[in-house]
Image: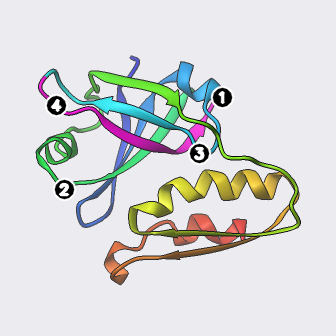
């Protein structure tokens, strides 16, 4: 079912990952682009960078931090639930080319948008150096995912 949450993970306190069935977006999205999600008719429209995607399986991954009413309510959704709206891909994709050596930096929830860009730059033949950080050790995520890219 389109917009269905097929995987949910708590990456850190109040930071959630949703893998969503969205084959149309998964086929077209490029690193650096985002989607706008709305969990119900009264929810806010929330822009979120696509943190990962799998065009073969038709899924996109979003990561968000629970900071307000809509994101807290969205964080209560579980596997099998659906989001009312997932619109995208939106925005200009990042420029990906073989530059030589590139440094990609992400902090906190900003780690999520840097991941697909770093992967694409590595796939383009670059030597990639990833620097990720967070305010505390508990808020740091995707260390193991980022390591093979740099």
Q: Quadrant of the C terminus?
A: bottom right
Label 4 – label 2 distance at C-alpha: 14 Å
In the rendering, at what x and y percent does residue 4 appear? 35, 26
Q: Is residue 41 left or right of residue 96?
A: left
Is 122 drawn above or below residue 78 in the view shown? below
The 10 Å Cα crowd at callout 4, few under 14, some 14 to 19, many 20 or more, is some
Label 3 – label 2 distance at C-alpha: 23 Å
The 10 Å Cα crowd at callout 1, few under 14, some 14 to 19, many 20 or more, is few
Q: Dot 2 corresponds to which residue?
A: 67
Q: Dot 4 corresponds to which residue?
A: 43
Q: Are marks 3 and 2 in contact (CB under 8 Å)?
A: no
Of residue 128 and residue 95, the one placed in the foreground of this image is 95
Q: Dot 3 corresponds to which residue?
A: 32
Q: Main secondary structure of the magenta part?
A: strand
Q: Is residue 29 left or right of residue 37?
A: right
Q: Are marks 3 and 1 in contact (CB under 8 Å)?
A: no
Is 51 drawn above or below residue 35 in the view shown? below
Is 148 drawn above or below residue 65 in the view shown? below
């Amino acid at each position: 079912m389109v917009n269905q949450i097929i995987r949910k993970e708590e990456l850190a306190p109040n930071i959630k990952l949703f893998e969503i069935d969205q084959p149309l977006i998964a086929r077209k999205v490029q690193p650096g682009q985002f989607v706008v999600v709305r969990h119900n008719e009264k929810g806010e429209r929330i822009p979120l960078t696509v943190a990962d995607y799998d065009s073969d399986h038709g899924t996109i991954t979003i990561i968000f931090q629970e900071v307000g009413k809509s994101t807290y309510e969205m964080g209560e959704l579980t596997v099998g639930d659906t989001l009312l709206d997932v619109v995208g891909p939106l925005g200009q994709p990042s420029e990906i080319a073989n530059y030589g050596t590139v440094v990609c930096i992400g902090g906190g929830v900003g780690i999520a948008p840097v991941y697909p860009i770093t992967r694409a730059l590595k796939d383009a033949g670059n030597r990639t150096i990833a620097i990720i950080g967070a305010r505390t050790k508990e808020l740091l995520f995707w260390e193991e995912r980022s390591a093979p890219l740099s």
